Amino acid sequence: MGTIVLHLAGSGSTTKSGFNPTFFIFILFAVGVFYMLLVRPQRARQRRVMQTQNQVIPGQRIRTTAGMYATIVSGDDRDVVIEIAPGVEVTMLRRAVMDVVSDDAMPTHEDIGEDGAEEPEEDAEEEQAEAPGEPTDAAPGDDPELKDRNV
């Protein structure tokens, strides 16, 4: 009986192991899925960004990778000069151009108040004041629902 146990215990290492094509096919499938889901879309995105960066011309409105909106003033193969505010020009690498934006998507100086925050539209304030059932003269602490809570 001891001989059978020894023979069975050693059978995995002493016998020839055959090539298992299922494992090889699984690895190829995993690499293919990885390529299709991650690598290929990233390369396409990089190609579009590089094409945009190479095609910017003076006068176009852009958004930089830092999130600034600006207008292209001039540029060469490596750098671009952008205007981020009236009379304020900055030289940046061309690679910092993220995308070209349309004029209506970029906030103008009139939309931004003195404190740097966008000013709300007056129509929205009037609609909120005229909303039925909303107390307009009440102070924030006068809400009856909040008085019942132990906050």
Image: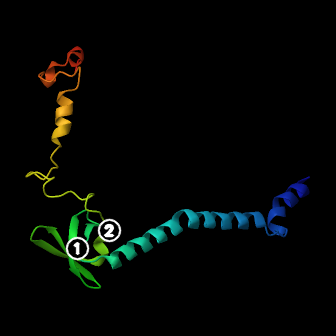
* Rendered location of residue 100, percent (x, y): 31, 68
Q: Is residue 60 left or right of residue 108?
A: right
Viewed as shown, does residue 23 lie left or right of 100?
Answer: right
Q: Which residue was labeled with disc 2?
A: 98
In this rendering, is residue 68 above or below 149?
below
- Mark 1–mark 2 contact, CB under 8 Å? no
Location of residue 77 in the rendering, given as x and y in whole percent from the top left corner: 29, 85
Query: Mark 1: few, some, or many residues within 10 Å (few <14, many ≥20)?
Result: few
For residue 79, which quarter of the picture? bottom left
**On the rendered structure, is 90 left or right of 18?**
left
N-term-proximal mark, 1 vs 2: 1
Residue located farthest toward the bottom when viewing the structure as drawn: 77
Specify the amino acid type for callout 1. Answer: Gly
Q: Is residue 35 above or below residue 78?
A: above
> In the rendering, at what x and y percent does residue 16 appear?
84, 70
Q: Given the image, on which type of amino acid does mark 2 rest?
A: Met
The quadrant of the image that shows the C terminus is top left
Mark carried by residue 59? 1
**Mark 2 residue element:** strand
From the viewer's perspective, is the residue at label 1 or at label 2 nearer?
1
Q: Quadrant of residue 125?
A: top left
**Label 1 vs label 2: CA separation?**
16 Å
Return the residue nearer the eye: 23 or 139: 139
Q: Residues within 10 Å of mark 2 (few under 14, many from 20)?
A: some
Q: How many numbered marks, from 0 up? A: 2
Q: In the image, residue 114 lies at what x, y percent?
A: 7, 52
Which residue is drawn at the image coordinates 72% and 67% (left, top)? 24
